[in-house]
Amino acid sequence: MKDIIKQLVSKAIRESYPGSNFEEFIEVQNVTAKNIDADYFTNISMKLAKKLKINPTTIAEKIIASLDKQEDFIYFFSKPGYINFKVTDIMKNNIIQKINESDNLLYGCKTDNPKKINVEFVSANPTGPLHVGHGRGAIYGNIIAKFLTIQGHNVTKEYYVNDFGNQIHILLISIFSKIDNEYAAGYNELYQGEYINHIASNLTEEQKKLIINNSKDFFKKIDSSGPEKNLKTHIVNLMVGIIQQSLMNLNIDFDNWFYESSLFENNNVSKIINKLEQDNYTFTKDGALMIQADEPRVIIKSDGNYTYFASDLAYHNIKMNDYDSVINIWGADHHGYLPRVKVGLKALGHDIDKLDVHLVQFANLFKNGEKISMSTRKGQYIELESLRKEIGNDAINFFYLTKNKDQHIDFDLNIAIQDSKNNPVYYIQYAFARIEKILISIEGYDINKHKFKTLDNDSEKEIIDTLNSFTEIFHKAIIQLEPHLITNYLYKLSQEFHSYYANVKILDNKINYDRVYLIKAIQKVIKCGLDLLNISSPKEM
RNA sequence: GCGUCUGUAGCUCAGUUGGAUAGAGCGUUAGCUUCCGAAGCUAAAGGUCAGAAGUUCGAAUCUUCUCAGGCGCUCCA
């Protein structure tokens, strides 16, 4: 629709101002002002006013005079230079039919340039269960991957498992110390969650013996093959299993679980470090190997151990080689880490434009008015799984997706649980269920047999306008990866439906087929939107 | 101090890429069930869009500065 108007305007400008070349400045936008009875407008005359040094009113009127007569639109001027376009009711009503007859409402989101894309998200350390702090990234990342898939990209969803280095060491110590207290010596902060006891008590006698007999030598053998390594792998697998289960309960699945340890087994880390050294990007300082990024950053510590940065570079190096586009969903606390990754990848010869990092702001959690900082280490956290159980998948999805990722969100756990009954998601689902009830009650009638007439009372017009905007909004949400546009849209559509439902009889003594046809379209759009957001559409509630 | 995200109604958040009189939910107040599901509808009250300057015909939106808050500034991961 906007394109048609744009072409009309463009033609009119060529006629009224020959030789001008302003087509690229033409923008057609939706009318949001309530006192203007039109659907679209363009502000081109205001833009031209400056360039041509003519006042915008004159320009607008001249353009309007040159606009081709069209059956589908009415044009009119409003101050100081808007050209408004009102679409005829007949034209608008077509959307109802289009929606009802379409077998794919998202047709048109497909890209011309399908890429192989890796989306890495969550990637919480396997040292404890997922807590509510991880929920936002999990749900957001999953939807982003889904939207990219709908666009036609070949998407791999990946979880990077940090099963190497210090924190795994401490995890093992935490568990081992339950079996042999000597392990705890020298550590003042060990993992404390209930899962530590659980894992410790479920180890086999053989495993326990291994722990007790090895004492302090255990960690010297952990990376070479043998029973020590097997035990470590066993424990990591248990942890990953806990995480997988809670993601699965949220219907989030990954295509690939990439283990940090595999980078060392395949010498990927040493390879990239050698390359960086050969290309003179590194230098040695105080016995450590460093690279100059935003600041000098350590790759190999003076004790000879690799930093997290070293393996992460190796990891990204692989992703950059294997994919056309690499997307990371990170918590905002990692933003300071990005510059060094970029510098490292650039040094390795990669085009860093291929890397796209989405920083998701924190969801601050309060309980009884007090802020709770999630800390796995301190055993101070609220499991994502317990929140999910409490408020349900639909409410938790909607809650996270309705907010922009750049927005910090605060929520009080008590209020969240209490409010979950008031979650707007139920309002939308209720609209769906109400429509379903009507449609079921007239099952057996062939509604398609009836010729559709124009609907024209005010509430119907309002709904039809909203339905007309659905393609544009859904496409924008999917292409620009902004799920909250859909949540807002669905709410608005549901609101208009509920109001309509309360005021207008759809089934009276006889069936009003035009209205049935309308609500059927509404239901289809709601279903489409809820599906997109991984939210269910129950037929009754 | 530096980097980064944010500041919109009592609270939680939208605001269609610079447009016309800034919107919802919750909460508050007042109404609506002989009738398709009241998880609903109708209405009221509630705003210096943190503040200031600037750019523009036009700013919640862009620029600069100030103030306030979150997060990060480890040879942690």
Image: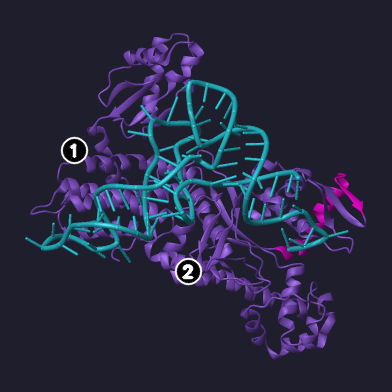
Q: Which chain is cyan?
A: B
Q: In this figure, which residue is indicated by the disc labeled 1?
A: A454
Q: Nearer the viewer, residue A439 or A154?
A: A439
Q: Nearer the viewer, residue A198 or B44?
A: B44
Where does the C terminus of chain A fall, quadrant-wise?
bottom left
Q: CA distance from mark 2 to mark 1?
A: 49 Å
Q: Which residues are magenta?
A: A260-285
User: Residue A485 at what x, y percent from top left?
Assistant: 44, 47
Q: Which chain is purple?
A: A
Horizontal arrangement in the rendering, residue A305 relative to residue B50 (left or right): right
User: Is B45 situated above or below A537?
Assistant: above
Precedes in sequence: disc 2 or disc 1? 2
User: Residue A526 at what x, y percent from top left?
Assistant: 34, 52
Q: Which quadrant holds residue A378?
A: bottom right
User: Residue A500 at what x, y percent from top left?
Assistant: 23, 49
Q: Residue at x 82, y 57 (%)?
A: A270
Q: Are marks 2 and 1 on the same chain?
A: yes
Q: In this figure, which residue is indicated by the disc labeled 2?
A: A414
Where does the N terminus of chain A fall, quadrant-wise?
top left
**Looking at the image, do the residues carrying marks 2 and 1 touch, with CB atoms under 8 Å apart?**
no
